[in-house]
């Protein structure tokens, strides 16, 4: 491999799917601010994801609605409740 082109902070990171709680550990250079204690007793950086292969409709075969940011409620408040005068 070429020297100097790979990230220096390549380490074990926990990726957690926030829609269903599924988590897994893999090597990554992603920037994180949180940590989590894993099943093996070690503490690893935590990266929170909105969707993973355990919750994505393509992989699960079922439609699962995830609205963690409240975008639909915000849209309804802004545009859905307007009445014509």
Image (cartoon, grey):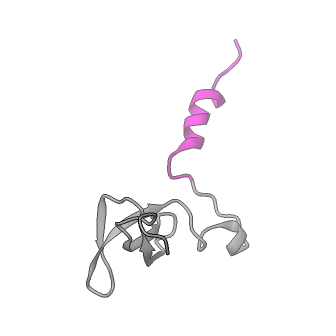
Residue closest to the eye, 34 or 65:
34
Q: Residue at x 43, y 62 (%)?
A: 48
What percent of the width, then of the height, locates residue 72? Answer: 60, 42
> Vertically, is 32 above or below 1?
above
Q: Residue lying at the far front in this picture: please name it.
A: 2
Give the residue at x 64% y 28%: 79
Viewer-side residue, 54 vs 13: 13
Closest to the observer: 41 or 28?
28
Q: Which region is colored magenta?
A: 67-85
Q: Position of residue 83 (x, y in %)?
A: 67, 20
The answer to whether 48 is drawn above or below residue 59 in the figure is: above
User: In the picture shown, does residue 73 fall above or below 3?
Assistant: above
Q: Which is nearer the eye, 58 or 62?
A: 58
Does 44 sit left or right of 5 as displayed? left
Residue 60 in the image: state x and y as whole percent.
68, 74
On the image, which quarter does residue 74 sit in? top right
> Residue at point 56% right, 63% down?
51
- Left or right, 75 with respect to 84, comes to left
* Quadrant of the frame with the C terminus: top right
User: Total label count?
Assistant: 0
Asked whether 62 falls inside the magenta stretch, the response is no
Q: Quick check: is 83 in the magenta stretch?
A: yes
Whole-percent x, y for residue 45 in the image? 32, 68
């Amino acid at each position: 491999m070429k020297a100097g082109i790979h990230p220096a902070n390549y380490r074990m990171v926990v990726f957690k799917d926030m829609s269903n709680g599924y988590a897994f550990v893999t090597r990554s250079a992603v920037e994180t601010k949180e940590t989590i204690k894993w099943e093996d007793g070690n503490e690893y950086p935590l990266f929170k994801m909105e969707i993973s292969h355990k919750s994505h409709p393509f992989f699960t075969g079922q439609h699962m609605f995830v609205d963690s940011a409240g975008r639909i409620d915000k849209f309804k408040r802004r545009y859905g409740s307007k009445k014509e005068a």
